[in-house]
Image: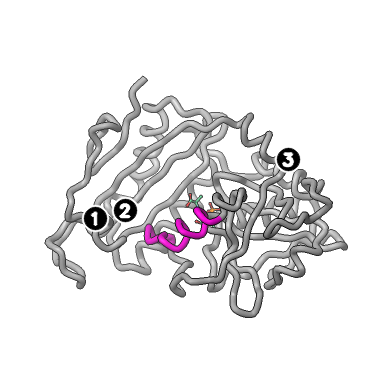
Amino acid sequence: MPRIAYVNGRYVAHADAFVHIEDRGYQFADGVYEVCEVARGFIVDMPRHLGRLNRSLTELSIDWPVTPGVLPIILREVVRRNHVADGLVYLQVTRGVASRDFAFPAGTKPSLVVTARKADPAAAAKRAESGIKVITVPENRWDRVDIKSVGLLPNVLAKQKAKEAGAQEAWFVDADGTVKEGGSSNAWIVTRDGVLVTRPAEHGILRGITRTTLFDVAAKLGLKIEERGFSVAEAKAAREVFISSATTIAMPIVAIDGASVANGHPGSITLSLRHAFFDVAEKSPA
Ligand code: PDD
């Protein structure tokens, strides 16, 4: 079954899906994106993802590429045409195609690309059963990481370093040892008293949609959350450590920089959040 992508108003074969060489996303990383999980035939938390897209676009003064009400239809159509029941749908909006010049071009129409791909829920469940490893790297990103920009080179380099170290995620850490977030996820710990701790999302991190929905899940499970920074040392001594993102949900961390944390096993609170997540998240039929 050939994969299909949406590119600027057309559904095309994935292999023939192209944007122009002077697309500003390609030349300047002048664009934003969203990734939604697709689970059991539903797009998970789509309204929250589109709300954050609206914020990212507004912060960068990029116009909506289509009427906001049309985007859910396109996302659903791409998921449907690719027969994705479990996987993800990716959307990217750039400022559009214009002759290379740093300042915003006049009258350029934003570009919209949407793709979808399958993922194996059994493989993800298996990863969650054993947990994954993180390394830490110094924070070297710009200070507007609250915008979900496609400018991800520090994240690419950090995650490559993690891969080379046999880990699956890299945590950006401030000069004072405070954990910011992962290359593509938010960071959490569970204290000895069973309290969830995650950094406030006002600045310095992306306000993860999974993070926001986990607040709802925690409330349902009667778990307390403290929004505050935590250090690498505190994480290493925590009862549980996990990350959250649309592609991982709540994923246990069992090692930080090669040292075992949380007895080297996924924690029960993390797994209970993971298991309750889908019941609490908003589900739009795909
Ligand atoms: N990344 N922080 C960063 C830097 C991210 O790139 C992501 C998501 C998150 C978690 O956000 P959410 O819960 O909305 O997925 C936090 C996506 C999955 C990606 O780039 O593939």
Left or right, 126 with respect to 194, comes to left
- How far apart marks 1 and 3 lie (CA) works out to 42 Å
Q: How many neighbours does mark 2 have within 10 angstroms: few (below 14), some (14-19), or many (20 or more)?
A: many
Instruction: Answer whether residue 68 is magenta in the image.
Output: no
Q: Amino acid at mark 2?
A: Val
Helix, strand or loop status at disc 1: loop
Most distant residue in the bottom direction: 176
Name the residue tied to disc 2: 93
Residue located 59% across and 75% down the image: 174
| Closer mark to the observer between disc 1 and disc 3 | 3
Residue with the mark numbered 1? 110
Residue nearer the viewer, 96 or 278: 96
150 left or right of 118 in image = left
**Disc 3: which residue:** 130
Vertical comparison of 64 with 88: above or below: below
Q: Predominant secondary structure in magenta?
A: helix
Q: Are marks 2 and 1 in contact (CB under 8 Å)?
A: yes
Q: Residues within 10 Å of mark 3 (few under 14, many from 20)?
A: some
Of circles 2 and 3, the one toward us is 3
Q: Earlier in the sequence, mark 1 or mark 3?
A: 1
Q: Which portion, as a residue range, is magenta?
A: 148-161
Q: Quadrant of the N terminus?
A: top left
